[in-house]
Image (tube, helix red, strand yellow):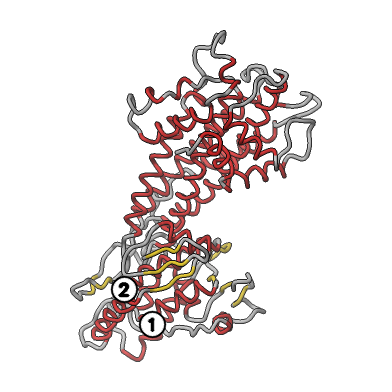
Amino acid sequence: MTLTTHEPLTVTLGSSGITAEDVLAVARHDAKVTVSQEALDTVAKVRAHIDGLAHSETPAYGISTGFGALANRHIPNDLRTQLQKSLIRSHAAGMGPAVEREVIRAIMFLRAKTLASGRTGVRPAVLETFVKLLNAGITPVVKEFGSLGCSGDLAPLSHCALVLMGEGEATGPDGELYGVEGRPAVAELLAQHGIEPVVLAEKEGLALVNGTEGMLGMLLMAIADLRNLMTTADITAALSVEALLGTDQVFLPELHAALRPHPGQAASADNMLKVLSNSPIVASHKEGDSRVQDAYSLRCAPQVAGAVRDTVTHAELVATRELAAAIDNPVVLPDGRVSSNGNFHGAPVAYVLDFLAIAVADLSSIAERRTDRMLDPARSHGLPAFLADDPGVDSGLMIAQYTQAGLVSDNKRLAVPASVDSIPSSAMQEDHVSMGWHAARKLRKAVENLRRVLAVELVTSARALDIRTKLSDGELTPGPAGAAVLEVLRAVVAGPGTDRFLSPELEAADRLVGSGAVREAAESAVGILA
């Protein structure tokens, strides 16, 4: 697999080898996908073996038999095409709101990766048509509910496979919807792009739906988002420490890796120390300050944020292993055996999805505590109540903290693990399932909430720093990193003043945090952050 990083992005699928960056390029940046000749040759060779088994008098699971609880029935040749159609149509049983386009593109690309491995037994035409859908910008409509994470993400993948057959519902590259009442059929959308619908042969229905692509795609995107947000969380935490006249001495390197060798903790402490470097505000109270210790939400920020970093690193390890997998049931082994297995079970992915949701909830919680501290005159060391222009007449950022608290509360609810649940299905054949899809869906919401929580902390700490500067007649200013971040923020969010319509400013800060601009601004002032 190779990734061309210049525009337009292109990803080439081989029989093995794919990275998280490849998935993000296709899912979020509409990278074009090609399939190597080596992969097509491998797929064709394995398919010839499947064709031989299909015409054998000996039943082979998933090739000449039914599926799941109906696996004991031998299917005659003249009904096998109907069997494949029936499988996909019946399994495309999702309900609820449509899943985001980037998630569906990740699902499709990851499944194409598995098809290209040669372990599934599909014809080359199936793989090539799947790739054509991606390159044409055709996006199947996948519904929120339907997957139990075992056997893989059956319903979401079936909705994708249905479009491959020219059926179901899909949107075109212009966002127009096809396949619903009153709109043209999906087959017409495919025809507009010169794509022939696939008539599935033996084994191909199962090969299209037996995988963990849905939960894995969402895990990869959550990890990418958290990499940006973790560094941003270190920055906003440092700005809050600065605004609250906290000390930077607790972030010295000799207090972290040397004494407690968690790499994430050391990285976060180093980030915070850099952001606070050369700060006139920090320097102003190094002498004559009677406080012995800062509150935990300030002093322990690297310990919490660092634990989140290490959790993400563990999740990356699991995701990398899953990216290297070729998941199907039955699977075609290199020696030609077609073997039933349980590799479609989503437990490994589901666990880390849930683990990340716990970490995200805690990171959002500690950020909210710092925000609340800046708004309370009893704890903010000289700042006006709620950072209001005229407390009592103005409410300042009082309700911004309410919004933040609501987001944190939501994240605590979303931290309840999905993977500890299991609802038996398929007449008790699938009697233990992972619920990994649900773990992934709630993690996406939690990450979104975290981004907004950090945006509120950013707006709050920035206003507090501006007020510090004003109260000191311009003598106490933030350090270079803080000044750079404030400059970027002030381009979209005004500084302190009388009360005004606050929601658009918080939304603008949210977009700024999500874009990575906060991290980039700090790095421009103090160098690369972890």
Secondary structure beneath label 2 = loop
**Toward the viewer: 199 or 263?**
263
Give the x, y percent position of residue 66.
32, 78
Of labels 2 and 1, the one closer to you: 2
Query: Dividing the picture into quarters, in which one does residue 399 lie?
Result: top right
Pointer 2 residue = 120
**Toward the viewer: 411 or 468?**
468
Asked whether the beta carbons under mark 2 and mark 1 sit within 8 Å of each other, the answer is: no
Residue 137 lies, with reference to residue 286, above or below; the image says below
Residue 402 lies, with reference to residue 477, above or below; the image says below
Residue drawn at 57 percent across, 44 percent down:
449
Residue 146 lies, with reference to residue 221, above or below; the image says below
Residue drawn at 22 percent across, 87 percent down:
56
Give the x, y percent position of residue 250.
45, 21
Residue 66 appears in the figure: no
Residue extending farthest to the right is: 393
**Toward the viewer: 251 or 226?**
251
Secondary structure beneath label 1 = helix
The amino acid at mark 2 is: Thr
Residue extending farthest to the left is: 335
Q: Which dot marks residue 83?
A: 1
Q: Which dot marks residue 359?
A: none
| Quadrant (top left/top right/bottom left/bottom right) for the N terminus | bottom left
